[in-house]
Image (cartoon, grey):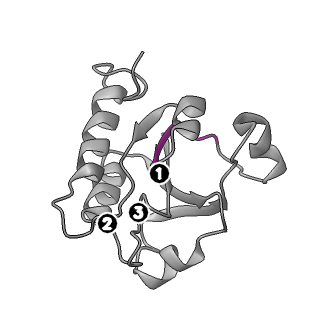
């Protein structure tokens, strides 16, 4: 499976640092035999890839479609289909399935949302959870 993570306010916070458990979530997904990708609707997030030493875990870095999500994949030259998306915005999760996390703004608060997203993904792959954590 191809698991896509949004960057701004999903992986990084207002302070520019990484949300807790990024590496752990990525490593768990990869250990389960899946691939991790990152994208952003505002930019191609090379800084996340390079500045935080995650190159060994990320299979691709892309500009994220912000509307007409499926059709935009070809236009944006994204060569793989997102099977599961982790994002602080509902739109991509509605389009592809996945897990919505709250924006990473309050950096001093305990935050295990990426571990929760991983657990939901793992349960979904096993057929034990719905395609997203959005209300039906």
Can you tell which quarter of the image residue 116 is in?
A: top left
Are the residues tagged 1 and 3 within 8 Å (C-beta)?
Answer: no
Q: Residues within 10 Å of mark 2 (few under 14, many from 20)?
A: many
Estimate the x, y position of residue 133 in percent, counting from the top left: 36, 29
Query: Is 113 or 121 nearer to us in this picture?
Result: 113
Q: Along the horizontal axis of the image, is 33 left or right of 85?
A: left
Q: Secondary structure at mark 3?
A: loop
Residue 27 rendering spot, x and y as whole percentages:
30, 59
116 left or right of 91? left
Is disc 1 placed on a helix, strand or loop? strand
At a point 40% along the width and 80% down the height, the residue shown is: 52
Q: Residues within 10 Å of mark 1 (few under 14, many from 20)?
A: some
Which quadrant of the rendered structure holds the C terminus? Answer: top left
Q: Is residue 95 above or below residue 105?
A: above
Residues drawn in magenta: 81-87
Q: CA distance from mark 3 to mark 2?
A: 5 Å
From the viewer's perspective, is residue 121 above or below residue 59?
above
Could you say which is closer to the camera, residue 115 or residue 3? 115
C-alpha separation, residue under disc 1 versus residue under disc 2: 19 Å
Residue at the limit of the structure toward the left, as seen here: 110
Looking at the image, is 74 positioned above or below residue 131?
below
Q: Are marks 3 and 2 in contact (CB under 8 Å)?
A: yes
Q: Which residue is mark 1?
A: 35
Nearer to us of marks 1 and 2 is 2
Residue ID for mark 2: 19
Specify the label residue 11 is tagged with: 3
- Residue 64: percent from the left, percent from the top? 66, 53
Q: Residue at the bottom extreme?
A: 51
Drawn side of residue 91 relative to residue 21, left or right:
right
């Amino acid at each position: 499976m191809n698991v896509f993570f949004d960057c701004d306010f999903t992986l990084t916070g207002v302070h520019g640092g990484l949300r807790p458990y990024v590496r752990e979530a990525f490593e768990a997904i990869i250990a389960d035999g899946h691939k991790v990708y990152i994208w952003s609707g505002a930019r191609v997030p090379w800084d996340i890839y390079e500045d935080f030493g995650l190159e060994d875990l990320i299979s691709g870095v892309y500009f994220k479609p912000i509307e007409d999500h499926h059709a935009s994949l070809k236009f944006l030259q994204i060569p793989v289909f997102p099977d599961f998306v982790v994002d602080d915005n509902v739109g991509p999760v509605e389009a592809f399935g996945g897990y919505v996390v709250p924006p990473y703004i309050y950096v001093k608060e305990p935050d295990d949302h990426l571990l929760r997203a991983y657990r939901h993904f793992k349960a979904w792959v096993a057929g034990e959870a719905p395609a997203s954590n959005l209300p039906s």
